[in-house]
Image (spheres, rainbow, N blue to C red):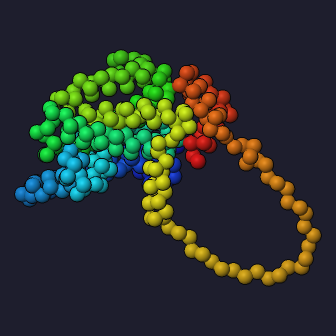
Amino acid sequence: MYGGFWYYLKNAFNQKDNSLYKILAINILVFLVLLVLRVFLTIGGGEELYRSILSYLMMPADVGRFITQPWSIITYMFLHEGIFHILFNMLFLYWFGLLINEYLGSRKLANLYILGGIAGALLYVIIYNFAPYFSTQANHALMLGASAGVYAIVVGAATLSPDTTFHLILLGPVRIKYIAIFYVVVAFANSTGANAGGELAHLGGAALGYFYITLLRKGTDLGKPVQTVGRFFGNLFSNRPNVKVSYRKKHPPYKSEPLKKDNSKSKNTTSQEEIDKILDKIAEKGYDSLSKEEKRKLFEYSNK
């Protein structure tokens, strides 16, 4: 790609249909802001103030507290504190996000990330409030991190194209379905450990990723509400062009020819049935098995 990774990251907010780099950029910027804030407040004796600010952005397990800070179901999925926490999340987001972006487009990628984060948060709250094991922890438990959204993208990519191969250090070529299965099993095994809340969120995000792709193949896009909200805020903050009024002089009458109906749009219209067949072909044989025409149809449909 022209300019490479850093070019697209630096220009993430200047380009359309660039959800992957926008999500990466937001996570990195928030991490750096929190890092600077934590260092300065800690040095100045305001560590408690930093913790208080952070807690209002994290996802609480307590339902009563969540009602007072409903924005946290979105903000928590862009928060990281540890360098390795954000590093691994962003690497997996980038690797598997490229796959989703190529197959389904930028909007579907954003859908998976946001819905995965929400699903992870909801499962976290439900389990902490109804499972006896967590009954004493719900009042003070807080969660942060992009992992639920990332798991949704990882499992979504593996559901969409399970036989796509990644070359891993020391292991060599590995099909992504095995990578997804491994991480889901690890999350389940650790769901009663020190990071139980985070692991439960991983499982919620993973489940969302699987069902999102499965339903998408059947013609149902769970991400339509996400896109509606995104368009609302996009229109709200977009610069509207100035309206100019101009007057034209009358021209002498001239002979006009009847307009010809443009049938190009109807000829190129791609139906949902065609997209479903293309997605099924990707799942069975991989993206490389598609013809140029099928790739064109998939790309155009993903940008609707």
Q: Is residue 189 left or right of residue 246?
A: left
> Quick one: 75 or 203, which is closer to the camera?
203
Residue drawn at x 44%, y 60% is 233
Q: Seen from this angle, which residue lies furthest right? A: 255
> Quick one: 124 or 182, which is closer to the camera?
124
Snapshot quadrant of residue 122:
top left
> Quick one: 226 or 125, which is closer to the camera?
125
Res 13 seen here? yes
Residue drawn at x 66%, y 39% is 271
Q: Position of residue 253 (x, y in %)?
A: 90, 77
Q: Is residue 79 left or right of residue 26?
A: left
Image position of 64 with respect to 176: above or below: below
Q: Position of residue 44 (x, y in %)?
A: 8, 59
Q: Position of residue 8 (x, y in %)?
A: 45, 47
Q: Position of residue 73 (x, y in %)?
A: 30, 49
Snapshot quadrant of residue 289:
top right
Residue drawn at x 22%, y 49% is 63
Residue drawn at x 36%, y 17% is 171
Q: Is residue 96 left or right of residue 134?
A: right
Res 95 seen here? no
Image position of 241 with respect to 18: above or below: below
